């Protein structure tokens, strides 16, 4: 490592000294203590998504059998854990720290190690969230006896180079990323709560089977909802193949384009010229896949612009019904439930036309549609904030470590 490489791209003010490089084995020891007397019953594991977790709490039962845990390694609060035998396609992680505040036991399949030198555990835990150590793992690991397994011996593992700044800079970095993690967790919880709230309101603001009024309504609405056939309140539109068009400026929406949106469809990968022999699908129409596995994904969108659609799609143009309300109803009930799944899943006019739809008067439709549109905007806002914070963290992890 060159002197120039011994400092990160971004540092807190006041820190100028180059970072030291240490071997993991110089700052940590492998934990070899086993639960021989069986007094520790908390069985922990290392989840790629959630870090060190309690098996009993996370899975609602202990995955390990009680008769086996005497041979499990003891893991204390602050210890680190790594699985040295994982798939060859994912040979570099994760290494996580026990932040549960409890002693537990960890399967012998894992390597547990404990800091022995004055290195800040929080700093080190964030270093292991970078990819700065991945190159070492890929270079030093080997497939062993099985071609589908990646393994690395303990002796080699503890040769891993660890960048170590001064103790005060370690603390500053660890504290910063911990606070950033707390902020990300806060926004994740807000987002999750809004998603759950929306799901709950969708269930309560539409009538249950056999009922004519929903559990929750806006003030001033008391009339029972009317049941209509979907074919009575929409015009069904069909698509045309790409060969029917030349390049132009109109949207030409295919099923794959629905992956890039969640409610309104404003864009498409392909643009075409107008074709007078093909009827365009009007803005505000509900579009969705009518053939193949995509039906099961229930990807239903509202066209934000007049467009043409592919032959694997269908459009419903609302007639006397609010487009946002109809979109909500279809999302809530799921058109995939009426699809013909005997061979290749498909939805045809014969499925759409008799499909029962419960609808209130137009004013209540619009009130419900507006409410959920605003709720979706709020969910999207929190989602974007969350993604921004995650992107910021990823960028800073790359730039604040050597």
Image (cartoon, rainbow, N blue to C red):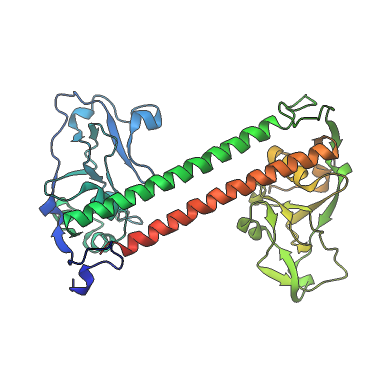
**Residue toward you, 117 or 176:** 176
- Where residue 244 sits: x, y (%)? 79, 71
Q: Is residue 84 visible?
A: no
Q: Quadrant of residue 35?
A: top left
**Residue toward you, 266 or 357:** 266
- Where residue 10 sits: x, y (%)? 31, 65
**Residue toward you, 197 or 146:** 197
Give above or below for 135 relative to 105: below
Total numbered labels placed on residues in the image: 0
Give above or below for 150 relative to 10: above
The answer to whether residue 235 is left or right of residue 269 is right
Which residue is found at the position 71% from the left and 28% from the top? Answer: 216
Which residue is found at the position 48% from the left and 56% from the top? Answer: 388
The answer to whether residue 325 is left or right of residue 99 is right
Q: Residue furthest toward the front?
A: 14
Which quadrant: the C terminus? bottom left
The answer to whether residue 147 is left or right of residue 273 is left
- Where residue 204 sits: x, y (%)? 68, 30
Which quadrant: the N terminus? bottom left
- Where residue 283 sits: x, y (%)? 79, 58
Q: Quadrant of residue 267?
A: bottom right
């Amino acid at each position: 490592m060159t002197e120039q490489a011994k400092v990160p791209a971004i540092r807190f003010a006041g820190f100028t000294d180059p970072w030291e490089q240490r071997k993991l084995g110089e700052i940590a020891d492998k934990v070899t203590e086993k639960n021989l007397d069986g007094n520790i019953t908390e069985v922990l594991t290392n989840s790629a998504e959630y870090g060190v977790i309690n098996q009993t709490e996370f899975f609602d039962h202990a995955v390990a059998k009680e008769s086996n845990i005497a041979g499990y390694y003891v893991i204390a609060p602050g210890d680190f854990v790594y699985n040295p035998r994982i798939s060859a396609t994912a040979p570099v992680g994760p290494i996580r720290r026990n932040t549960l505040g409890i002693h537990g036991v960890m399967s012998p399949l894992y390597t547990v190690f404990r800091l022995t030198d004055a290195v800040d555990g929080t700093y080190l835990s964030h270093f292991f969230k970078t990819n700065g150590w991945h190159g070492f793992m890929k270079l030093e690991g080997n497939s062993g006896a099985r071609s589908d397994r990646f393994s690395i011996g303990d002796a080699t593992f503890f040769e891993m180079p660890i960048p170590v700044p001064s103790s005060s800079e370690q603390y500053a970095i660890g504290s910063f990323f911990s606070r950033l993690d707390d902020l990300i967790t806060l926004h994740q919880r807000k987002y999750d709560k809004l998603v759950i709230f929306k799901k709950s309101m969708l269930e309560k603001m539409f009538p249950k089977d056999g009922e004519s009024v929903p559990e929750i309504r806006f003030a001033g609405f008391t009339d029972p909802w009317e049941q209509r056939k979907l074919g009575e309140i929409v015009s069904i539109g069909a698509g045309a193949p790409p060969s029917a068009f030349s390049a132009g400026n109109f949207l030409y929406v295919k099923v794959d384009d629905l992956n890039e949106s969640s409610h309104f469809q404003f864009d498409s990968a392909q643009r075409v010229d107008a074709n007078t022999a093909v009827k365009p699908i009007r803005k505000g129409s509900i579009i969705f896949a009518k053939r193949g596995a995509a039906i099961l994904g229930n990807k239903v969108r509202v066209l934000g612009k007049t467009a043409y659609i592919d032959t694997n799609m269908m459009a419903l143009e609302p007639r006397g019904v609010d487009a946002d309300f109809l979109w909500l109803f279809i999302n809530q009930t799921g058109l995939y439930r009426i699809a013909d799944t005997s061979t290749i899943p498909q939805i045809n006019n014969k499925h759409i036309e008799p499909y029962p739809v419960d609808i209130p008067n137009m004013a209540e439709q619009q009130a419900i549609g507006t409410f959920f549109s605003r709720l979706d905007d709020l969910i999207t806002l929190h989602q974007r904030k969350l993604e921004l914070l995650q992107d910021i963290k990823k960028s800073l992890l790359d730039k604040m470590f050597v």
